[in-house]
Image (cartoon, rainbow, N blue to C red):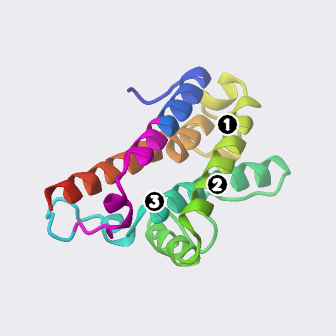
Amino acid sequence: MARPTTKTDLLNAAKGDYQALNTLISSLSEQELTTVFDFSEDEKKKEAHWKRDKNLRDVLIHLYEWQMLLLNWIASNQKGEKASFLPKPYNWRNYGQMNVEFWKKHQKTSLEEAKILLENSQEKRLALAQQFSNEDLFTKGVFDWVGGTTLGAYFVSATSSHYDWAIKKLKAHQRKCQQN
């Protein structure tokens, strides 16, 4: 599916990809749910997240925390409190460290709690997106705090694009479990 460029496409992609993620999760076997993610033998999987996330909970928490970044960023800026998308001391060069902190923060979070957190943030994110017009979401320069892109691009990144990332990761884990 092409990257959303309208409010309708954004909402449909977020809902559809979230449903696809949940459908995949519900199809995971007990073995797939309990086997630790290990992609160390795959030379193509070099990015840090392939080593960081060890189970479904870790993936869901990553999605949840990024949705919370979006929600908190928008809320702060709407109140007139100038905030960056990434909280200090993080930036686009070192946000990998932030992801590790999210991972550490949730090592005692249960899988069931992670599912609930993500479901709640998904609902809040959809409700927030509904409040903006198509122009608010997909016209550059509407909000000075967004920078050189569009608010909609941030919504896409924190939802449908991230869901696609999670689905690819879970399918790779599923294939690996089925090969063993």
The residue indicated by pointer 2 is 116
How crowded is the residue under tag 1: few (<14 C-alpha within 10 Å), some, or many (20+)? some
Q: Nearer the viewer, residue 157 or 45?
A: 45
Q: CA distance from mark 2 to mark 1?
A: 15 Å
Q: Is residue 35 left or right of residue 180?
A: right
> Which callout, 2 or 1, points to the residue nearer the camera?
2
Q: Are marks 2 and 3 in contact (CB under 8 Å)?
A: no
Please give the label number shown on residue 59.
Answer: 3
Mark closest to the chain's N terminus, 3 or 1: 3
Residue at x 64% of width, y 54% of height: 116
Residue lying farthest right?
Answer: 79
Q: CA distance from mark 2 to mark 3?
A: 13 Å
Residue at x 22% of width, y 61% of height: 45
Q: Position of residue 154 (x, y in %)?
A: 57, 43
Residue 39 sits in which quadrant? bottom left
Residue 124 sits in which quadrant? top right
Is residue 14 visible to us here?
A: yes
Residue at x 63% of width, y 48% of height: 119
Which element is circle 3 on? helix
Q: Type of residue at label 2? A: Ile
Mark closest to the chain's N terminus, 2 or 3: 3
Mark closest to the chain's N terminus, 2 or 1: 2
How crowded is the residue under tag 3: few (<14 C-alpha within 10 Å), some, or many (20+)? many
Q: Are marks 2 and 1 in contact (CB under 8 Å)?
A: no
Residue 161 among magenta residues: no
Q: What's the magenta region?
A: 20-39
The residue indicated by pointer 1 is 126
Q: Is residue 54 left or right of residue 153?
A: left
